[in-house]
Amino acid sequence: MNAPTYNFAYLDEQTKRMIRRAILKAIAIPGYQVPFASREMPMPYGWGTGGVQVTAAILGPTDVLKVIDQGSDDTTNAISIRKFFAKTAGVATTTATADATVIQTRHRIPEAPLRAGQVLVYQVPIPEPLRFLEPRETETRRMHALAEYGLMHVKLYEDIARFGHIATAYAYPVKVNARYVMDPSPTPKFDNPKMDNCPALQLFGAGREKRIYAIPPYTSVVSLDFADHPFTRYRFDAPCALCGAGDSYLDEIVTDDSGSRMFVCSDTDYCEGRQAEGHRGTESAAPHKERPHG
Amino acid sequence: MYVAVKGGERAIENAHRLLAHTRRGDRDVPELTLAQISEQLGLSVDRVMGEGSLYDRELAALAIKQARGDLIEAIFLVRAFRATLPRFGATEPVETGAMQVQRRVSSTFKDIPGGQILGPTFDYTHRLLDPNLAQGFEPEAPATAEASDTPTPRVTDILGRDGLIESSPRAAADTIVGDLTREPLDFPAARDLRLQNLARADEGFLLALGYSTQRGYGRNHPFAGEIRFGEVEVEFFAEEVGFAVPLGSLELTECQMVNQFKGSATEAPCFTRGYGLAFGQSERKTMSMALVDRSLRARELGEDVTAPAQDEEFVMSHSDNVQATGFVEHLKLPHYVDFQSELGLLRKLRKEFAEADAPPSLKEAAE
């Protein structure tokens, strides 16, 4: 039995070339889902295999990689993926949004504005925004081809008729470059406006569903809404208990069994950065950080 | 007070260390060897090779050991390794008619040329727990006889000679066999890709779907034309030498179902086929596969598509247990950001509901 040896960033060069071709096509047709021959990765489907393949295909030796899950660098799966690339590609890793050239994310867009030259790689579970309205791929591909998005608007309208609001809190559908309706991956709708006209390149990888799509820099991304029911962001109305930020997305943390809660930034790098600058919240004395990791 | 909810690198490392310890179990009990797994849990190895799509007993045994006997986890390990292997090409089609059969049964004829051969089978055993096995014992040596050189042609070929069954389509010599691990799947899928998908599909999923066709959800009136298990030669056409060279041999199970077909305006009534093939001795898998293959041919044969087992997109999109287990189990990953977003929406809706529902007097009181 030969001990397996792996290429830089795990994937072989042929596979990377295939993925890069899909990425280029995706960039050329913003918001369009490009089928690609997704490989079986050494982590389970649904745990970021699409994002990992995209990252592996674009990573170079001089890149600096940041991996977040739920906005945090310290969540277990983010650690696992960061370690995977530190081991297979030997690239530098960081938790600082500003220092990273490639940021792989699950469920959040960093609070700090991204800049030109950075790439944000999203892990996508279900790339098809129409999937829960029409389960058949053969049908949804046709609907995209014909830009037949009436069904989605009917769904949003029905939400308003029933609940008084569009009852989609995350994975809120957007229209990219005034053409394709796209699933932004399950980010909270709070993050949707950050995708619009973003200087960074945004790539989306869905491994199990074998799709890659992209938003090139400075592309229009509009959250679907109605003139009389405009899109609104949701954020719990409180400052971060640690850094006092009033503009960041907050995690709700249950602190005891009698219902006490506190609200802190979900973006840990943002929160730590603010605290380092001297910003304080009501609970900021409490140590909240694990020891720094490698 | 802040409760630490973030996982740590050390926590992961310790969890994996504990996993390795738990995998080993009681250290006073001798450790399993790969040879023991391969020899004594052979059907597990066969399943892992089949659904892992890699014919390597030793690696499959290693995967089973590493996975603590969890076969889907073992299949996943084999698949992830397989994905890194270079691809040289496709072998020549194997000739299952020339199989060195160890077992071969047909339910459609009392006797067949070459004979019915029971071979090593659970069939007709009484399922009584055997206390002898608990203690460990030497079984009797198997009965032997002179090897027969009578050919064992496939039963479907015998039917085919009289035109009673549709002929298997023959691919042109230069046709490239599809490979869904190298090209993304597109619907409708050709039969080669469907069969590849079914060969890699979860045995339990196919079993349930095949069973559903028997119970009337897309019934296709099957007979087990033949099930055969044995060894076949594998050949590879080598460009450099200009002919096919033998690479070795494989153990395979093949099942051909014979199904009714009413015929059409242009075709005389004849039997149709459902096909199942898997590595090793995998009878349940190949029989289920053959049932599902036949029911997926509904559209091709002009039958109504009414049942899940006839729905190509449904079957092929959900048959892969590595994909399925990954996505189901990913629910273990943190989802608290989205949950928070839903919580916010739910609180808002409930507040509005309470306000709208409260009787006017209460409403006033609240205001």
Image: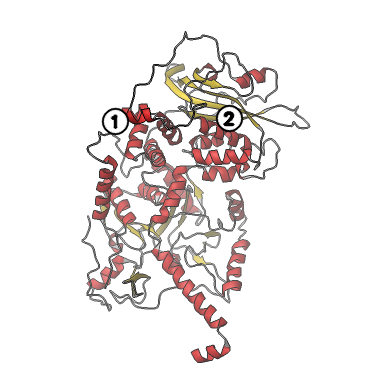
Query: Exactly how many numbered labels are in the figure?
Result: 2
Label 2 resides on the chain identified as: B
Residue at position x 57%, y 41% in the image: B209
| Labels 2, 1: one chain | yes
- Which type of secondary structure does the marked residue at label 2 adopt? strand
Q: CA distance from mark 2 to mark 1?
A: 35 Å
Q: Position of residue B136 (x, y in %)?
A: 33, 27
**Circle 1: residue type:** Thr
Of badges 2 and 1, nearer the viewer stands 1
**Circle 2: residue type:** Tyr
- Residue named by callout 1: B33
Residue at position x 52%, y 80% in the image: B354
What numbered label is drawn on residue B275? 2
Q: Position of residue B251 (x, y in %)?
A: 45, 23
Give the quadrant of residue B245. Answer: top left
Q: Is residue A85 above or below residue B3?
A: above
